[in-house]
Image: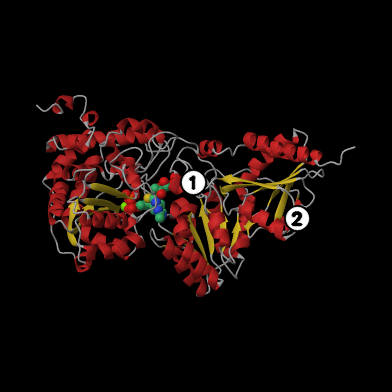
Amino acid sequence: MSELSDQTTAGLLPGIKTPADLKRLDPDQLTLLAAEIRDFLVAKVSRTGGHLGPNLGVVETTLALHRVFDSPRDRVLFDTGHQAYVHKMVTGRQDGFERLRQRGGLSGYPSQAESEHDLIENSHASTALSYADGISKAFALRGEERHTVAVVGDGALTGGMCWEALNNIASAKNRLVIIVNDNGRSYAPTIGGLADHLSTLRLNPGYERVLDLVKDALGSTPVVGKPVYEVLHAVKKGIKDAVSPQPMFEDLGIKYLGPVDGHDIQAMESALRRAKGFNAPVIVHAVTRKGYGYRPAEDDEADCLHGPGAFAIETGKLLAAPSVKWTNVFAEELVAIADERPDVVGITAAMAEPTGIAALQKKYPERTYDVGIAEQHAVTSAAGLAMGGLHPVVAVYATFLNRAFDQVLLDVAMHGLPVTIVLDRAGITGPDGPSHYGIWDMSVFGAVPGLRIAAPRDATTLREELREAVAVDDGPTIVRFPTGSVAADLPALRRVGPVDVLREDDRKDILLVAVGAFAKLGMEVAERVAGQGYGVTVVDPRWVRPVPIELASLSRGHRLVVTLEDGIRAGGVGDAVASMLRDAGVSVPLRDLGVPAGFHPHGTRAEILTSLGLTAQDIARDVTEWVSQLEEAAAEHQPQG
Ligand SMILES: Cc1ncc(C[n+]2csc(CCOP(=O)(O)OP(=O)(O)O)c2C)c(N)n1
Ligand SMILES: CC(=O)[C@@H](O)[C@H](O)COP(=O)(O)O
Ligand SMILES: [Mg+2]
């Protein structure tokens, strides 16, 4: 008996430290291991939250690829990296799952600091094939007979960069294996012509029969384990990988193998060994199920438990009590606006539910467009919709708009088109780490001529500013708000132009310009600084780019202006206010507080903000220090005698 089989009673998984350990397992052990991995994923992610559905769907595919290829000599890439948990489990990081996506714990995406087996740390979709094109070219040029393997989701494949890469991969003709992990879904079912094409391939009559067999057998239990083991045995003699000429890819010059049952390790291994032997670009089309083997995930209509918070294993239901999210307020107000404005339409980039566009889609399906994971296309298609007389509202997570800067600048703003872009998850988000932090928009898009950016501080101002945005008909607007529960309403004492005065003190010691959801933080700072004997006025600009000129008159006469934003300082609102004050001839010392431009680690939003000194206590201490330094300087310049 191999030493591994001695662990059958304790399970095989603990004995898997490297991919080499997988190569010693026999088919029955592999099937058992797959069941153990599913148990492990459900157990761990139910406690930490994370990308359960995607990873349940790539168990067999990951085991097969690590048995056929030799990572890290052969490079394995994931698109998107949220489906790399199994890869992490078989490359020595099982213990890390106790603190998955927690500060100082395992990243939810590949991380070079964690392992030599990891490469792509960026969580943005549709990039892996471009990396793979470059890596395979480098291996070829250096004369290294190494393989590059890219696991690409069907959703990621709807992103434009994938097709730019495929165009190059086809002509470069280097050894490169592309595993299309086709579970038919992004969050919701994947849209578009490509998705339809893939589904024609997977509608091989054999597949439906096999997958129904699996689903029926799982009916008896909500939790993975033995039933999955038996079922996977039953289908082992099921679908064989089929080599079928595939015009769309073959015409590109890329071989196609499939469709292959992505839950049949032997079938996947056989297809991957064949693909490896081609030593040329080849697609292995793996047909999988998102959430496979865990009934609550498989049955979750919304997104197959794509990325839940902590949940009850028996039911898959979230443990956290529901709260009103910023997204919910946006969704409700968008539908109310759409009721009044037949020209308002919605666009999502494969994230209707997470961005709230689903509410519009439900009531006005004909006025809602899901363009796939294609933010650049979303923006320029919105420009087209606006040219056609409509007012599109494009809802994306702030971080994902980065890739559409050119489209916003030249396709929308240069033409002065009425497009409203709603940025959810703006600012520091937390568990998804640096490539998810929506900290760039107020700086990067603040440079776009004619673009106006609103940053609401609570539900009331979100509703108000969204309405103001869709009322703008001569250029683009952005409305940005953070992740999580919406802030309690913060009423204004008065309004000066677009600027709300939230707190006022005639002593004019400090003017605190608090941006968006940081208004609450600004008020907490003001209370602390006032407790030190200083007079603090707090204002919320509401529209933050271009900065309101009214801030000049509000700043005049103060000893110090402090700006506070949930975005990068460089080129942010603080810089813009300082520049505007200079231009207005208002010479008041200004200190700008915000997020340092950088790739900040993952953790909770509160932990990251604390690490950056963006807490009421830290800021109050800084502000008090700054204003007392000004007092000392002023005293030194008093005429003596
Ligand atoms: C550019 C970009 N837009 C949106 C997202 C958000 N997102 C994360 S995973 C996902 C769905 C990915 O679908 P697919 O590639 O099919 O992988 P699956 O989750 O089905 O395994 C989306 C839209 C992203 N990561 N990157
Ligand atoms: C992988 C990805 O990009 C998304 O699934 C992201 O993790 C979702 O983030 P939220 O949890 O903030 O919706
Ligand atoms: Mg998918």
Q: What distance separates the C-alpha of mark 2 from that of mark 1?
A: 31 Å
198 to 96, vertically: above or below: below
Determine the image quadrant of residue 244.
Answer: bottom left
The amino acid at mark 1 is Gly
**Residue under circle 2?**
586
Q: Point out residue 423 in the picture as x, y percentages from the top left corner.
A: 52, 55
Q: Residue at x 34, y 37 (%)?
A: 114
In this image, 116 relative to 332: left or right?
left
Quarter of the picture containing the C terminus is top right
Q: Is mark 1 within 8 Å of ligand 2?
A: no
Farthest residue, direction bottom = 388
User: Which residue of the protein is positioned furthest toward the front in this rendering?
Assistant: 640
Image-based side of 95 in relation to 607, left or right: left
Q: Which residue is mark 1?
A: 598
Residue 221 visible here: no
Crowd around label 2: few <14 · some 14–19 · many ≥20 (10 Å): some
User: Quick check: is the Cβ at mark 2 less than 8 Å away from ligand 2?
Assistant: no
Q: Which secondary structure lies at badge 1?
A: loop
Viewer-nearest residue: 52 or 311: 52
In the image: residue 585, left or right of residue 357? right
How crowded is the residue under tag 1: few (<14 C-alpha within 10 Å), some, or many (20+)?
few
Camera-nearest residue between 31 and 148 = 148
Q: Of all residues shown, which one is farthest toward the right?
A: 641
Q: Pinpoint residue 203: horizontal percent, then vertical percent.
A: 21, 58
Identify the amino acid type marked 2.
Val
Residue 640 location, x and y as percent? Answer: 87, 38
Residue 63 image point, x, y percent: 21, 41
Q: Earlier in the sequence, mark 2 or mark 1?
A: 2
